[in-house]
Each structure stands twice: as structure tokens, then as C-alpha cells.
Image (spheres, helix red, strand yellow):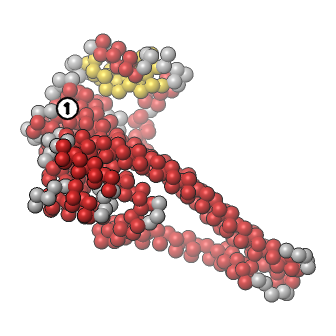
């Protein structure tokens, strides 16, 4: 029977934690509730590793010395779900925030919760307190909380917000994890070729000079590149770092970033994948806003902050203007030429049936699956191309070295 390490809160607000065995996650949650506690977390641990889990937990203060100084979106999603759980259990907001302070494992989280709690106890609404920390909470997040406060359903809104953040993280992790292998392969390929050129190829220079024969052009080029890299590698490394810095700097400039975004959407394989990622994010974000009572126009205005591609942000602005003039949403989306046609058709059906939020949820589900399958197809194409490219580069280097060697020995190639 699996073991679960849990954290729970009593009705008096005391944090309790321990280890329970249960057949399933639902079973341990039910058992915690039977004990009169409010379950906060329940994570499965291996039977042999439960002691290790507790030991790791006890060392959190030491690990925090090396922890990041910012709160990640994954941590924010967990905190949001915990706050939603406490509020839906009937605890007052300030008491819930106090419990989150006790649950915080890092100083940066604890300080953030303390600041928000102090604002709330001073009479500020939660959305107003969050607005003081724009470096952590996005405009989207704050407006969602504001909608929950206005509708008197803060707990439910926070739970849906946590679901949204977790789905967004899953989509992002799918893309990032899929890129790890190609990036590693590219680095290994570059390192392998650099080692060949810098340490292996120059060894043949003296042999060819002693032979006194005219070298083939390809051999001459390979030798020149290898000797240059060996003698001037600090300059090469500095030049590469400078290029990377210039690219990153231009990426931060709005005008330059917009040009990059436009070019990337036009690239084969990568462009369609980025468009599907942005479409999934657009549909999921807008659906979450609409389901929580945010008007469509206001939702589109808020939505611009969640999109990473400048081309899509510009298209949303166009749709917003057309929507104000009474043209609806689907037709202007189609006219921009940015949004996928399938998504636009589904949104048009949602408008016609008065179920736009439900249809947007379906659109986000469709494009989440599309992103996963597109990533698989891209990897199936990119990996063989990279392997063939590496083999071709090494083959050219070997041919460039062996060709004059065979000529010197008067052997047929």
C-alpha cells in the first residue's frame, strides 16, 4: 500500500503534517477529512523513501540558501490552490493567508504572504493587495481575483485559476522537455566538431608540409579553420558570446521582438508549432476569464498580457476594435490571418450558440493535443536531420584529411 506525505490544517488553523498509507490519493484525502482536518497537500512517497522525504523536508531551510530569489509560476499555482482550498473550507481570508505563511518553505514566499496579509488586515481587498506585487502576479491573475471578489465566489475562482496555471505549465513543460534532447545533441555535435578541428586536424599540418604536394581546396580550408580555432579560440568564444548577447538584447526591445516573432511564425515546422501554442494559451485564458464573469471586451484587453508573441497580441488588438464596432469576434479573427481556421470556426459556433466559454475550453483542449503531436512530429524530423548533419560534417573533415594521405601513398580513393 503506497504511503502519502500530507499537510493539513485543523479548524483552529494549526498546520499538521505526517505520513499515511492509503490505496489512492482520494483515499488519503478522505481519511484526513475524517480526522477533522482540511487537506492541503498529499504527495505519494515510496515506502523505503518516506524517511528520506521527511529528512529532505527538514533540510528545507538549508536548501533555501541556494533557492531562487523569485517565486516561480509552479510555486504560485500551488499556493493559489492551497488558498482556494482554505477559503472554500470556510476559513476567513486573513486566517487563510496566515496559514499560508506557516506553510511557506522559502523566505521569499513567506515575506510575500506576510505583505499580502498585512494589506488585507489593513482593509484592502485581496486583488488590491496582489496589485502591489506586479512582479509576481500578472494583470490576468489580479483581474481574475477581482472578478471572484465581485461575484462572491473567490474560492471557486482561485481553484479555476490554479487549474489554468497548472494546464499552462503542462503545455510549457511539454515544449521545453521536448527541446532538451535536440539542444543536447546540437551541443555535443558542435563540441565534437570543434575538438576534431582544434586538436586532430592540426596534427596533419606538418605531414602535409613535408610531403610538399598541393593540397585539395577542401583540405586547405579544413586545415585553415582548424589552425585558426586552435590559435584564436578566445576570440571565437568571445564572438559567439557577443552574438548571443546581441540576440538576447534585441529580444528584449519591443520593435525588434516584434520582428523576431513575425519571422519565427514564418519558419517551417517551428512557425506552426508556435502558432498552436499561442492559440491554446489564447483560448484557455479567455475561457477562464469568461467563466469567471469578466466581460468579453475586458477579457481581450487583459488577455494581451498573457500572450508571448507580438503578432498575436497585435491581432487581439484588432479583434478588440472590431468587436467594439459590433462585428463579433470570429470574423475579425479570420481576417487577421493569424489565428488557425479550425479554431476560428469553433469560436464562431460558440458565438452562434451562446456558449463561447465552453467552446473556448474545447479549442484549448484541441490545441493542447495539437501541440503535443506537433512536437512529436517536429522531433521526428529534426533529430534525423541533426544526426545526418553531424555525420556529414565529420565525414567532410575525415575526407579532407584522408584525400591527400591517399595521394601521398599513391593509393586509389
**Which quadrant would the C terminus be assigned to in this image?**
bottom right
Q: Position of residue 83 (x, y in %)?
A: 24, 32
> Image point 84% across, 86% down: which residue?
213
Residue situated in front as seen by the camera: 65 or 365: 365
Q: Is residue 159 above or below residue 394?
A: above
Q: Quadrant of residue 294?
A: top left
> Image point 30% across, 71% down: which residue?
255
Residue situated in front as seen by the camera: 49 or 155: 155
Residue situated in front as seen by the camera: 84 or 319: 319
> Image point 55% across, 58% down: which residue?
382
Q: Which residue is mark 1?
A: 155
Extreme-top residue of the structure:
34
Q: Quadrant of residue 202?
A: bottom right
Q: Position of residue 20 (x, y in %)?
A: 42, 16
> Image point 52% across, 71% down: which residue?
240
10 Å crowding of disc 1: few (<14), some (14-19), many (20+) = many
Q: Mark 1: which secondary structure?
A: helix
Q: Position of residue 198 (x, y in %)?
A: 69, 70
Q: Quadrant of residue 108?
A: top left
Q: Is residue 104 above or below residue 256?
A: above
Extreme-right residue of the structure:
410
- Indicate left or right for 364 with 203 as reference: left
Q: Is residue 104 visible?
A: yes
- Indicate left or right for 55 with 265 as reference: right
Amino acid at each position: 500500500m503506497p504511503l502519502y506525505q500530507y499537510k493539513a490544517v485543523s479548524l483552529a488553523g494549526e498546520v499538521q503534517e505526517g505520513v499515511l498509507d492509503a490505496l489512492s490519493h482520494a483515499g488519503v484525502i478522505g481519511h484526513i477529512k475524517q480526522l477533522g482536518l482540511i487537506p492541503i497537500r498529499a504527495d505519494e512517497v515510496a515506502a523505503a523513501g518516506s524517511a528520506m522525504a521527511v529528512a529532505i523536508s527538514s533540510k528545507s531551510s538549508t536548501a533555501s540558501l541556494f533557492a531562487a530569489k523569485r517565486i516561480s509560476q509552479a510555486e504560485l499555482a500551488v499556493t493559489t490552490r492551497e488558498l482556494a482550498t482554505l477559503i472554500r473550507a470556510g476559513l476567513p481570508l486573513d486566517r487563510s493567508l496566515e496559514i499560508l505563511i506557516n506553510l511557506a518553505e522559502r523566505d521569499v514566499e513567506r515575506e510575500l504572504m506576510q505583505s499580502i496579509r498585512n494589506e488585507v488586515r489593513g482593509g484592502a481587498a485581496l486583488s488590491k493587495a496582489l496589485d502591489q506585487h506586479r512582479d509576481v502576479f500578472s494583470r490576468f491573475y489580479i483581474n481574475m481575483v477581482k472578478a471572484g471578489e465581485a461575484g462572491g465566489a473567490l474560492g471557486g475562482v482561485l481553484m479555476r485559476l490554479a487549474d489554468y496555471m497548472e494546464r499552462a505549465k503542462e503545455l510549457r513543460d511539454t515544449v521545453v522537455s521536448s527541446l532538451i534532447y535536440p539542444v543536447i545533441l546540437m551541443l555535443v555535435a558542435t563540441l565534437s566538431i570543434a575538438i576534431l578541428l582544434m586538436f586532430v586536424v592540426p596534427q596533419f599540418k606538418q605531414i602535409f608540409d613535408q610531403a610538399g604536394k598541393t593540397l585539395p581546396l577542401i583540405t586547405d580550408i579544413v586545415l585553415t579553420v582548424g589552425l585558426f580555432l586552435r590559435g584564436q579560440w578566445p576570440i571565437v568564444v568571445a564572438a559567439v558570446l557577443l552574438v548571443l548577447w546581441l540576440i538576447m538584447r534585441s529580444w528584449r526591445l519591443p520593435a525588434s521582438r516584434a520582428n523576431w516573432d513575425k519571422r519565427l511564425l514564418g519558419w517551417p515546422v517551428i512557425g506552426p508549432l508556435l502558432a498552436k501554442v499561442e492559440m491554446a494559451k489564447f483560448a484557455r485564458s479567455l475561457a477562464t476569464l469568461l467563466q469567471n464573469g469578466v466581460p468579453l471586451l475586458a477579457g481581450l484587453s487583459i488577455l494581451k498580457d498573457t500572450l508571448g508573441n507580438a503578432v498575436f497580441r497585435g491581432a487581439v488588438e484588432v479583434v478588440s476594435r472590431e468587436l467594439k464596432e459590433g462585428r463579433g469576434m470570429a470574423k475579425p479573427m479570420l481576417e487577421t490571418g493569424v489565428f488557425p481556421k479550425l479554431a476560428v470556426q469553433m469560436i464562431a459556433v460558440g458565438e452562434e450558440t451562446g456558449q463561447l466559454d465552453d467552446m473556448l475550453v474545447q479549442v484549448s483542449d484541441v490545441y493542447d493535443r495539437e501541440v503535443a503531436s506537433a512536437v512529436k512530429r517536429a522531433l521526428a524530423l529534426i533529430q534525423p536531420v541533426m544526426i545526418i548533419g553531424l555525420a556529414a560534417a565529420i565525414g567532410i573533415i575525415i575526407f579532407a584529411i584522408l584525400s591527400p594521405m591517399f595521394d601521398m601513398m599513391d593509393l586509389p580513393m
